[in-house]
Image (cartoon, helix red, strand yellow):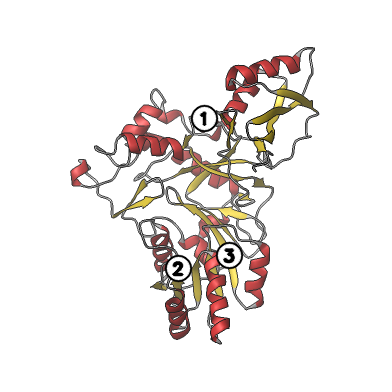
Amino acid sequence: MSEFYDALETRDPAVREAALCAALAAQVAAAQRTPAFAEILRGVDAAAITSRAALAQLPVTRKSALLERQKAQRAQDPFGGFSAIGWRNLGMARTARRVFQSPGPIYEPEGHDADYWRFARALHAAGFRAGDLVHNSFSYHLTPAGLMLETGAQALGCTVFPGGVGNTELQLQAMVELRADGYAGTPSFLRIVLEKADEAGLALPALRKASVGGEAFPAALRDQLRARGIEAYQNYGTADLGLIAYETAAREGLVLDEGVIVEIVRPGTGEPVAEGEVGEVVVTPLNRDYPLVRFGTGDLSAILPEHCPTGRTHTRIKGWMGRADQTAKVRGMFVHASQVADVLKRHAELSRARLVIEGEMANDRMTLRAEAVTRPEGLAAAVAASVRDITKLRCDVQLEVPGTLPNDGKVIEDLRQIN
């Protein structure tokens, strides 16, 4: 049995990059045929978007903007003009196989391609193979999570038990009686099931593998599962994008999926950061049915150097490192990460900045810690004036030596005590 899902995983990186960039123009053109991106990308020559540098010039579309458009157009188009597929009453020539609802609510379409969400690759890396019985405890209700993993498992030739969420005792009974080979679901629910098994004196000797996602997967829990003979690997995806990255046997970060172009950008902006710097994960999936371009996930991560020791040659990311969509309310005013970015744009002397909010609610004080490459006289006062102009709030400015601020992607740090 091959360790790799297909030959794409071991391509020469230059060949992969050329193929991804070659697909960009067609992806942007497909997006421009939807009403939403026809507006967002108005005036963009799709044929010219053939490199990451060109892609980085396009605006980032974040989930909040997608939700706003969907809400505004709910009566005419529940997808807000972002989807190229739908059903007859929407006037769509191409049909969706399913439509899902995520919190918001946000509606997502599913096309007809086999393994539409591309999760077979993650399951294969986690050790799943044809003939395995997969106990799937991701939700089958409203959201696509359950079917994401089910269609991926079926693409591998696995049999699936659709456990869904809840009903812990019944799910445990099925795992014992059907002798499931593997588990798909959140890591916390797997822990709950195993604890129930211990309480009931039940054994799960066949369960040896797991693909987990949807929440953080701490190393301590991974080691607890390994002690029970279960090797669990993370998958990272969203309802909008499908699979983004997956863990391998190397246990060194997550390898990017072959069907997405991923950038790491400075939170609140669309500006790519240097390799290794923490920023927001922005994804362009090569999907003509739901042709999102530069979709901001709101998740923080960073690019890891070199390639996976397993031989997979695609880029690796560190995994989920927190949320990028940072907002705070100070003296009745909302402050956003994008406003901190706007301050940086006004002052070429600054490289990075972090807005620190301290004190107690209703007695707040803000300090902008800014790394300054050069420090001309009056810079701190000028930066403070920019902060006040942009946020309408007073702020102290503390100039720092480049490299002083932590590399954690945090742009707004709220240290206030809430009584």
Real-space Cα separation, disc 2 to disc 1, in angstroms: 41 Å
Q: Secondary structure at mark 2?
A: loop
Query: Residue 51 appears at what percent x and percent y?
Result: 52, 34
Q: Against 292, is 199 above or below? A: below
The quarter of the image holding the C terminus is: top right
Circle 2 crowding by C-alpha within 10 Å: few under 14, some 14–19, many from 20 = many
- Image position of 312 with respect to 394: above or below: below
- Residue marked by disc 1: 54
Locate residue 341 relative to residue 28 in the image: left or right. Answer: right
Question: On the image, which quarter does residue 217 sit in?
Answer: bottom right
Residue 281 in percent (x, y) is at 56, 43
Work out how far the residue at label 3 is from the one at label 2, CA to CA, in angstroms: 15 Å
Tag 1 secondary structure: helix
* Amino acid on which disc 2 is placed: Ser
| Precedes in sequence: disc 1 or disc 3 | 1
Q: Amino acid at mark 1?
A: Ala
Please say whether residue 1 is visible from this viewpoint. no
Between 87 and 73, the residue placed more toward the observer is 73
Q: List the single residue furthest toward the front.
A: 419
- Foreground mark, 3 or 2, reads 2
Image coords of residue 184 (percent x, y): 49, 67
Which residue, given by chain and number where applicable, does mark 2 sit on?
A: 137
Residue that carries the numbered disc 3 in the rendered image: 233
Q: Nearer the viewer, mark 1 or mark 3?
A: 3
Q: Position of residue 231 (x, y in %)?
A: 60, 71
